[in-house]
Image (cartoon, rainbow, N blue to C red):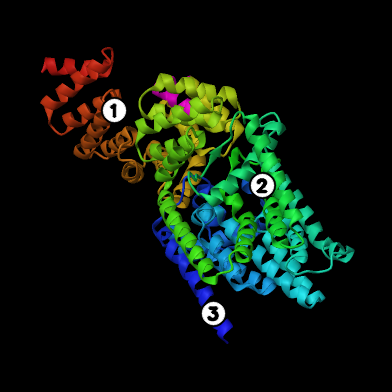
Amino acid sequence: MVVRNRDLWIYFLLFAAVFAVYSSVRTHDFINYDDPVYVVANPHVRGGLTWDGLAWAFTSFEHSNWFPLTWISHMLDVEMFGLNAGSHHLSSVFLHALSALALFALLVRITRARWPSAFVALAFALHPLHVESVAWAAERKDVLSALFWIFTLLAYAWYVERPSSKRYAAVVALFICGLMSKPMVVTLPFLMLLLDYWPLKRKLETRLLIEKIPLFALSIAGSIIAFIAQRQSGAVAALDVIPFPLRAENALVTYITYLAKFAWPSNLAVFYPYADHIPAWQWIGAALLLAAITAAVLLARATRPYLAVGWLWYLGTLVPVIGLVQVGSQARADRYTYLPMIGIAILMAWLAADVIKSPGALGTAATIIGVIWAGATVNYLRAWQDSIPLFRHAIESTGPNWVAYNNLGGTLRRAGQINEAIANFENAARIHPGFADIEDNLGEALVSAGRVDEAIAHLNRAIQIQPKFGKAHVDLGAALMHKRDPAQAAAQFQEALRLDPSDAEARFRLGGILAAQGRMQEATVQFQAALPYLTEATRLNPDDPEARHNLGGVLGMMGRADDAAVEFAHEVRLRPNDPEAHYNLGLALASQQHFAEAAAQFERAAQLQPDYLMAHYNFARALLAVGRTVEAQQEFSRTLQIAPDFAPARQALARFKQQ
């Protein structure tokens, strides 16, 4: 009874420690990096638990993976909490806490060593390397697959105690659930063989391999499905993009880097950029160190078998994500250590128990280490509050980081901080030239800042790099509209529609050109085709300023000025420093004869962008409409200072002289 109560206290303290350390995530937002495609803007997930959603989850290869249970877990969160980001994060914390408890239960069951098992569970629960897996909604697949991974091993331990078909079926079922959560669990059969050696001490014979043939078959099937999904989506890097020799060198260095970050978790980041070149001394030194450690643990296997098991656990479970088959553009990722580091913790805990004979000294050392890990995790979690501190932290931690600059730029642009966004996009483009998305993002931001000629150059560059990039064609068309070149703009919108007939923004912008040419019947066709997509976009993501902007634009062109004003007012609240948002709201208000309110919006647009010609001109017209004649005359004069040949302003001033 004493033993059971002591174990209960360990379970309780582990669970409480996880929630105490991760409590801040309840106030965190979603991140502008994968969270939109996994949750926030994913129509299948946002619909909650539905039969259509379940069917999609099991049949979709969307976003480079097949993990139906992960999709379903996101849907369940939406069903229970809506899009409350804090609740989604707390769900991941709960799964992480359960995994820590299950890990302790597993190790105690198979080793009968309470305190080393507790230390391993504590390392898993609190180490800052695991923040990325737990505090990032898009990494739900990590915490969910880990839970099934550990439950599978628990079922395996149960099976080994008294083998039966029923118990083996439980192992298979839980393993399948793990594969349907994240394919990284494919190494589980290999890990079971390690545990057969130690601590289960099963006699190593052919029957152990035969016993695991169904599990290895499932691993092979899971690996094939994952590769197909990633290849179809383009997530697997081509050999000429990241050559195999560089990937192999990076893999060797990464094995050592992860160990260093486990020992001293500093400069952690959401994205680690790939180096163009790895000095020979680094990868050769890493290879020699890995070989030396491997030789040492194998030589000691007779007296300290846990060293070989812990080390091979680490090496083997990292194989699917070490980068020999490159998925994505990162050099390494903290989330990839979520399960492999259990092996290193096992090695450390049992070695310490063997070397340090004093229970008091062991307990003191474990407590100090746990407190240090907890403090580091709490500190790192501050960077995960939302996208801006996260990407700034990544830049501080890694130096030149094109992904962090690009994502930070996108977040700042949506917040209306256009000049700072441009600076970040320019940094990204300088570090990673020739990337179409960055060129397009920079061009779009430059348009918002009124630097249209520069924007057009970058948007043309994006299209040269990736001719089938529909968004770049739309953004180039929008920039050409600012240059009053409707014919060329229409050609870009038509090309975007050729590439994707469902592109709502291309349709409504093309409709606007047709309407301006008096071709209202054709314009109406485009507006009506775009409207359902735009309405659905705002329903799915009501706080997306782009969605509000696009819907407001098409409603205004359809003559629904009241509805357009509502959308543009929402956009202004979301992007208070965006001159175009204020300008569009001003146009909608002026269409309703609300000239005083319109004047305030035009004035704000002109303040934010002093050379915004049409903002000054319409501000003058709104002032004239409310009887503020002297101010209107001054504003028409300012308009001519920007564009001396602008005929409407010149004509307005001429009428003043005639009065």
Quarter occupied by the N terminus: bottom right
Judging by the rendered image, the residue that carries numbered circle 1 is 609
Instruction: Tell me the distance, in whole angstroms, between the alpha carbons under discs 3 and 2.
Output: 38 Å
Residue at image coords 51%, 27%: 431
Question: Which residue is labeled 2 in the image?
Answer: 321
Q: Quadrant of residue 2?
A: bottom right
Label 1 – label 2 distance at C-alpha:
47 Å
Whichever of callouts 1 and 3 sits on the residue coming sooner in the sequence is 3
Q: Residue at x 52, y 52 (%)?
A: 132
Q: Residues within 10 Å of mark 2 (few under 14, many from 20)?
A: some
Is residue 476 part of the magenta span, yes or no? Answer: yes
Secondary structure mostly seen in the magenta stretch: helix
Q: Which residue is mark 3?
A: 6
Q: Secondary structure at mark 2?
A: helix
- Give amino acid for label 1: Gln
Would residue 613 appear left or right of 534 to someone viewing this image? left
